[in-house]
C-alpha cells in the first residue's frame, strides 16, 4: 500500500512540474513561511527582490536564456507573463511575440542609447526596437528601410538627414570638390557641401556627379570620360582624338552619360 501511494505521489509531482509554466519553476512558493518549493534545479529559490537569493542555475544575460513568460532583469530571470500581443501585457510592458512573453519596455530617448541594429521607439514606448544591420544606404534600402546610419551600422526609416548621392539639382548652390571615390550630397535639390563615399551611396550617382577620371572609368557601361588634349596635331582633331589626332598630353575634363558605351571624347582647346 505504501509503495502504491509512493508511486502515485511521484506521478502527481511529475504532473505538477509539467503544468508549471514560466518562472514558477524558478521561484518556488511566495508564501510568508519562507519554505518555498524546489526550483527546476532542485534547489529552493525566491523571486529576486523578495529578500532571498535567486535560484541557482537561473542567472541570465539575455531574455532568451529565460523560460517563456519570463525576462532577464539584473542578471536573473523574472516573471512577466504570457501574451499574444501587446494588449495582453501590463503597463510599461510589451509582447515579445517570438517568445510569447511580456517584457519591460526598454528606457530610451534617442537612438544612440540602443545597440547597433536597433532604434529607439519613443512614440509607442517600446524602447529599443530592432531594424537591421547595414554598412551603406544601399544595404538599408534593400532591406526595406530608408537609409543607413553608418556610424551605428543601423537601418533607419525615412530620408537620410545628411542628404543623398542622387536626385535632381534644382538650386544654384555650387557643387563641392570631393576626393577621389566620393560624390557630393544633395538635399532638397541643393548641394549640402558634404561628400560621401560612392560605395556608401543609396544608388549609383549620376555620371555628371563623378568628379574624377578613375571614378568615371569604372562606369564604362553608362558613362563617357572626356579629356582636354594639349598640343594636338593632325587632320581630324575635333571628334575623338586617337591616332588621327595625337596630342602631347591630355587631362580629364568631365564625365557624362551615354547610352551605348561610347569611346572617350577628346576636347581640343581653342587656339
Image: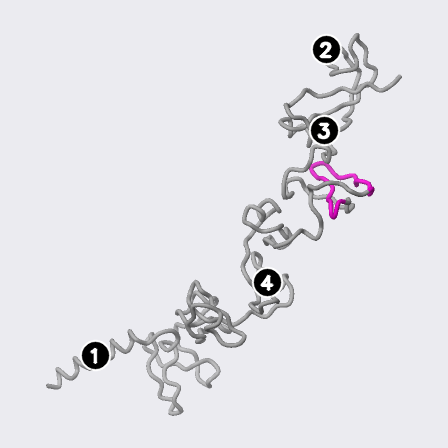
Q: Residue at x 55, y 62 (%)?
A: 129
183 in the magenta segment: yes
Q: Is residue 157 or residue 43 the one in the foreground?
A: 157
Quadrant in which the C terminus appears: top right
Percent position of residue 31, x then y: 38, 89
Mark toward the start of the polypeptide (3 vs 2):
2
Residue under pointer 1: 10
Q: Quadrant of residue 13?
A: bottom left
Magenta region, mostly helix, strand or loop?
loop
Please state the extent of the stretch shown in magenta in the rendering: 172-189
Please tell me the numbered disc located at residue 243: 2
Q: Which callout, 3 or 4, points at the residue further toward the start of the chain?
A: 4
Q: Which residue is mark 4?
A: 114
- Pointer 3: residues within 10 angstroms few (<14), some, or many (20+)? some
Secondary structure state at the residue bearing disc 3: strand
- Report the mark closest to the observer, 3 or 2: 3
Amino acid at each position: 500500500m505504501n509503495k502504491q501511494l509512493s508511486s502515485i505521489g511521484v506521478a502527481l509531482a511529475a504532473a505538477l512540474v509539467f503544468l508549471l509554466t514560466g518562472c514558477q519553476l524558478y521561484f518556488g512558493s511566495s508564501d510568508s513561511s519562507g519554505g518555498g518549493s524546489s526550483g527546476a534545479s532542485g534547489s529552493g529559490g525566491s523571486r529576486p527582490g523578495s529578500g532571498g537569493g535567486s535560484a541557482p542555475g537561473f542567472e541570465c544575460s539575455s531574455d532568451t536564456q529565460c523560460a517563456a513568460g519570463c525576462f532577464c532583469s539584473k542578471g536573473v530571470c523574472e516573471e512577466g507573463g504570457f501574451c499574444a500581443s501587446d494588449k495582453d501585457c501590463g503597463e510599461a510592458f510589451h509582447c515579445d511575440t517570438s517568445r510569447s512573453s511580456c517584457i519591460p519596455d526598454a528606457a530610451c530617448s534617442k537612438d544612440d542609447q540602443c545597440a547597433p541594429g536597433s532604434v529607439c521607439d519613443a512614440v509607442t514606448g517600446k524602447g529599443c526596437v530592432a531594424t537591421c544591420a547595414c554598412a551603406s544606404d544601399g544595404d538599408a534600402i534593400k532591406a526595406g528601410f530608408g537609409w543607413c546610419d553608418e556610424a551605428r551600422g543601423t537601418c533607419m526609416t525615412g530620408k537620410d538627414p545628411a542628404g543623398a548621392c542622387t536626385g535632381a539639382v534644382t538650386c544654384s548652390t555650387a557643387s563641392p570638390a570631393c576626393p577621389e571615390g566620393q560624390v557630393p550630397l544633395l538635399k532638397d535639390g541643393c548641394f549640402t557641401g558634404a561628400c560621401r563615399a560612392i560605395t556608401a551611396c543609396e544608388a549609383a550617382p549620376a555620371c555628371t556627379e563623378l568628379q574624377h577620371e578613375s571614378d568615371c572609368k569604372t562606369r564604362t557601361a553608362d558613362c563617357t570620360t572626356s579629356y582636354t588634349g594639349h598640343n594636338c596635331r593632325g587632320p581630324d582633331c575635333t571628334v575623338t582624338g586617337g591616332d588621327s589626332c595625337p596630342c602631347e598630353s591630355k587631362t580629364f575634363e568631365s564625365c557624362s552619360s551615354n547610352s551605348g558605351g561610347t569611346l572617350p571624347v577628346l576636347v581640343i582647346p581653342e587656339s
